[in-house]
Amino acid sequence: MLVAVLTTEPLGRALDYRAPPGGCFVGAFVEVPLGPRRVMGVVWGPGEGGFDPAKIRPVGRVLDAAPMGDAMRAFLMRAADYTLTPMPAMLRLATRAPGLADPPGPRRVYRRGRGEPDRMTDARARVMDVLDEYGGAAFNLGELAALAGVSTSVVKGLVKQGAVAEEDAPRDLPYPRLDPGLPGKALAEDQAAAAERLRAAVASARYGTTLLKGVTGSGKTEVYLEAVAECLRQGRQALVLLPEIALTAEFLSRVEDRFGARPGEWHSGVTQTERRRLWRMAGEGGVGLVVGARSALFLPFRDLGLIVVDEEHDTSYKQEDGALYNARDMAVLRASLCDAQVVLASATPCLETWVNAEAGKYARIDLTSRFGTAELPEMRAIDMRAEKLETNRWISPTLAAAVRARIEGGEQALLFLNRRGYAPVTICRACGHQIGCDHCDARMVEHRFLKRLVCHQCGETKPMPETCPSCGAAGRLAPVGPGVERLAEEVAERFPDARVAVLSSDLFASARALKEKIAEIAGGGADIIIGTQLVAKGHNFPLLTLVGVIDADLGLQGSDLRAAERTFQLMRQVSGRAGRSERPGVALLQTCQPEHPVIRAILSGEEEAFWRAEAAERQAAGMPPFGRLAGIVLSSPDVQGVFDFGNELARRDAPLRRIGAQVFGPAPAPIARVRGRHRVRLLVKAAKGVALQPALADWVGQLRPPANLRVSIDIDPQSFW
Ligand code: ADP
Ligand code: ZN
């Protein structure tokens, strides 16, 4: 008996193998020989046959994991077709569990022991730090040593002294059961009605998507937890996707309050031992609720009944390298294949979702007021043309006065600036040269905290030069414009007695350190918070009553299709951080164009009008979601080669013309060089409802790219860099 096995190796198709004695299930995880190696794969169906039987090799062994279900296999194939991702790469996403091929039986794990090291060395201290940081989690030996940056013998030494405990862990254990029968919070009337509709949808055990649109602080989380409760009552599994790891801590404790136990966690901050356990338990049904990052969508759930995408508008749901997928759209696809419900929760949904709800493809539930006595913040513009500002100052007198009033009242103020580092540009005052990255077509950003210049494209850093690299003048290099670090300097000068916290992703060594800082701020550990877009996401700071946006115009520059939508979402989100408990909040937006339609829409809060206008504009231009786009990025170290290839593709556009699609370009990408590779973009525009992907595949398939040239196809692109 022959079986076709799909592996994660980049081959064009599944390969035939002889089934193991006694046969195996379709979907079984197996180990098969491939050349001299053994690789992991999944039995995808009966073998094709037609090969010399003598050359067909047998399946090595069937792994100890629940077979992949039909719905999961269908999902991977549909997702591959949609995103034009090869199946092996899709399967890699679905098998990102360390030690999957390990034989069953106990494994050795390491945790914090009762003893203390007799003598503390640097290396030992690092191991103890890692153990503390992950709070009681178990590691395997190699992982613990790698995280601490020490050799395994250091860990072994600590085992001898009892500071690290070495245990034989039993087979991966199921997660504690969540109890949906525990009483939830008493819901307000509109919350209860919303919860009831979601409960009924989940109870139908059919596919459906609901937009849960509620202003910040309206209790969306409380409401969708009731949908989770219903899903658990049905004996099915639920998945909640969050855009940011730093948000999980608060969510985990809310789940524990509601259901009496913690859910499974899936993101980059989870140990490998825990990831392996969760992956298996998802497949065996040993976990009821998973909270995770976008990649949790590819866990092998045995019976998934509900997917919640919280902050569904968040751009981090789009995976921007490797397999380019949007977790929000893939959640809808996956749910439709396994009779599950999707809840898309947001205060500022993306236009696509808004349009789908208008068209009746998604149900829509609105929560229009904040829970309890909390009021939505009042929003006002500060017209920067009328404010007197000294050079290299960014906080207007009006905003400064408002900040001062908050501090005196024992409340918190947030100053929002979406720019990491000290200054976005470093210029030579003698010759005008701006310091750029050697590998990218991008300016380097000064980070004083790191004492280096950093390229935000490739991560390359270098020390600040003493002299201008272009004209050699000494002592003439000067920062231009503010980043959060420079803003912090201004704040320290103007509010010397205030406690200041800067929240920017690059200032924290680990996700855990960031989580702790956020908890500290929420508890009142700062008077002024300075933050990048990190702070716009869902955090709850009860004492925060003032949000000051340093530059509301920042996102409106440039020609990005989504500039207006993004600015609207970001400004509304960040303003929503203010006044979440008893005391009312105010949001002040510093702008040089208070009459700009987007700024006006943000201030007036007339959201439906904004979405309608935005939708009408996109419709008139045939742009998404009313038309379809695909972005093609070609990159190569060879600048001529990449343009030649792009021109050749553009010339051979017959497969695209057949479906009425147009191709634009090639043109240099806005960031024309990254890590030494030259980047060229083409854009394909098609009507909604045509079969775009097969046409794209035919089109690109006509030409074989040279070895050093990479072609990446981005369906429904979100960014155009
Ligand atoms: P959203 O997700 O819409 O921003 P949350 O669900 O986080 O809103 O709710 C905002 C705050 O109000 C949270 O602290 C939450 O615990 C509280 N809250 C919301 N609804 C209720 C309720 N029915 N009873 C008690 N507290 C609630
Ligand atoms: Zn660079």
Image (cartoon, rainbow, N blue to C red):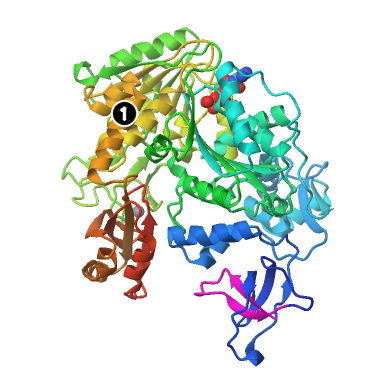
**307 displayed left or right of 120:** left
Residue type at mark 1? Phe
Span of residues in magenta: 1-19
Magenta stretch: includes residue 17: yes
Give the labeled residue for mark 1. 610
Magenta stretch: includes residue 602: no
Query: In this orientation, which residue lies closer to the viewer: 493 or 194?
Result: 194
Residue 511 location, quadrant: top right
- The residue sitting at 70% across, 54% down in the picture is 283
Query: In this orientation, which residue lies closer to the viewer: 2 or 111?
Result: 2
In x, y percent, where is residue 276? 69, 54
Rendered view: 3 above or below 138: below
Q: 10 Å neighbourhood of mark 1: few (<14), some, or many (≥20)?
A: many
Can residue 392 be seen here? no
In x, y percent, where is residue 7? 59, 71
In the picture, which quadrant includes the N terminus?
bottom right
In x, y percent, where is residue 409? 47, 7
Secondary structure under tag 1 reads helix
Query: In this orientation, which residue lies closer to the viewer: 408 or 172?
Result: 172
- The residue sitting at 64% across, 44% down in the picture is 305
In x, y percent, where is residue 591? 26, 24
- The residue sitting at 67% across, 21% down in the picture is 185
Count of marks overlaid on the render = 1
- The residue sitting at 33% across, 16% down in the picture is 399
Can residue 585 be seen here? yes
